Image (cartoon, helix red, strand yellow):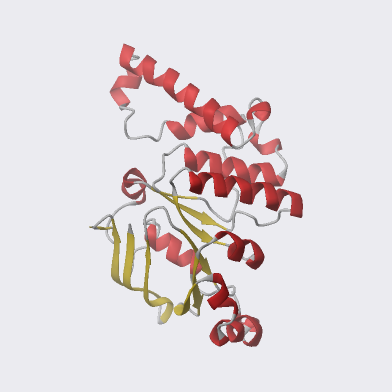
């Protein structure tokens, strides 16, 4: 589904990502891990068009994304969450899902502006979908709460729900468990697992190593912008380069 080859990004004279190669197969769950400053979020930004690669290719279902805009990439089916909680703070939980659904390319501007019958049908479909997603993420009882008033863990789950409203084929999760307590981690991992089992391909950045190793079937490890290892969780745990990166050069993290 996703084939990254020779991906490189320079900021000034420094490479944040350097000659990166890896693939993600359809319906696979892949972890992208590494110390702070390893280039993980930069890689996400390159895949989703928020940054433009210095060189290399990013193929999604055979199409090169390197010069595509973020909204075009989202329409193709690559949707991401962010480290910072991405919500509509002045909206209720339900309104947030409805607003996210209007990013769907199937909703035409003039159709909505002229309030045509086809638009009214789609509005009902959008509302039904929003309720369905909230039920799926176990937040239906919170639908009328302001998003800004939610506890941290539920804000993170709402961010995932907003991503689901865009119908991702490939879901990029950037530290979805950040700042959560053990109970929230367990419930969010259960949700991510349900999303994966529904057929959504997942690429996950996560600092919670136990969670990443437990969920992902294959792990790609970055350090200083370069891939230093790739394999099963067991292979990664035993890899000397990975142990060195986490324990030997952790002071250089960013």
x then y, percent, for residue 160: 55, 44
* Nearer to us in this view, 91 or 162: 162
Quick one: quadrant of the N terminus? Answer: bottom left
x then y, percent, for residue 170: 41, 51
* Nearer to us in this view, 202 or 35: 202
The answer to whether residue 77 is seen in the rendering is: yes
x then y, percent, for residue 104: 37, 34
Q: Is residue 204 left or right of residue 140?
A: left
Q: Residue at x 44, y 18 (%)?
A: 124
Quick one: quadrant of the C terminus? Answer: bottom right
* Nearer to us in this view, 200 or 14: 200
Q: Residue at x 62, y 66 (%)?
A: 207
Q: Quadrant of residue 161?
A: top right
Vertical side of 36 occupied by 114: above or below: above
Q: Is residue 214 left or right of residue 71?
A: right
Q: Is residue 141 left or right of residue 28?
A: right
The answer to whether residue 181 is seen in the rendering is: no
x then y, percent, for residue 175: 59, 58
* Nearer to us in this view, 225 or 197: 197
């Amino acid at each position: 589904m996703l084939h990254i080859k020779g991906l490189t990004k320079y900021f000034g004279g420094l490479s944040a990502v350097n000659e990166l190669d890896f693939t993600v197969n359809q319906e696979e769950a892949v972890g992208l891990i590494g110390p702070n400053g390893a280039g993980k979020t930069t890689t996400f930004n390159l895949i989703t068009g928020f940054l433009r690669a210095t060189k290399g290719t990013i193929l999604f279902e055979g199409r090169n994304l390197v010069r595509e805009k973020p909204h075009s990439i989202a329409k193709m089916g690559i949707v991401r969450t962010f480290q910072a909680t991405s919500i509509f703070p002045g909206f209720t939980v339900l309104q947030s899902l409805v607003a996210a659904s209007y990013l769907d390319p199937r909703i035409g501007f003039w159709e909505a502006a002229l309030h045509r019958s086809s638009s009214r049908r789609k509005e009902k479909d959008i509302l039904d979908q929003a309720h369905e997603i909230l039920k799926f993420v176990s937040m239906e009882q919170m639908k009328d709460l302001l998003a800004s008033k939610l506890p941290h863990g539920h804000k993170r789950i709402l961010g995932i729900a907003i991503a689901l409203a865009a119908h991702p084929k490939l879901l990029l999760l950037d530290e979805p468990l950040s700042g959560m307590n053990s109970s929230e981690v367990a419930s969010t991992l259960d949700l991510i697992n349900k999303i994966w089992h529904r057929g959504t391909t997942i690429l996950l950045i996560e600092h919670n190593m136990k969670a990443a190793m437990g969920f992902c079937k294959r792990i790609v490890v970055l350090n200083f912008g370069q891939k230093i290892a790739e394999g099963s969780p067991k292979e990664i745990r035993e890899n000397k380069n990975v142990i060195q990166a986490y324990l030997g050069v952790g002071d250089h993290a960013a």
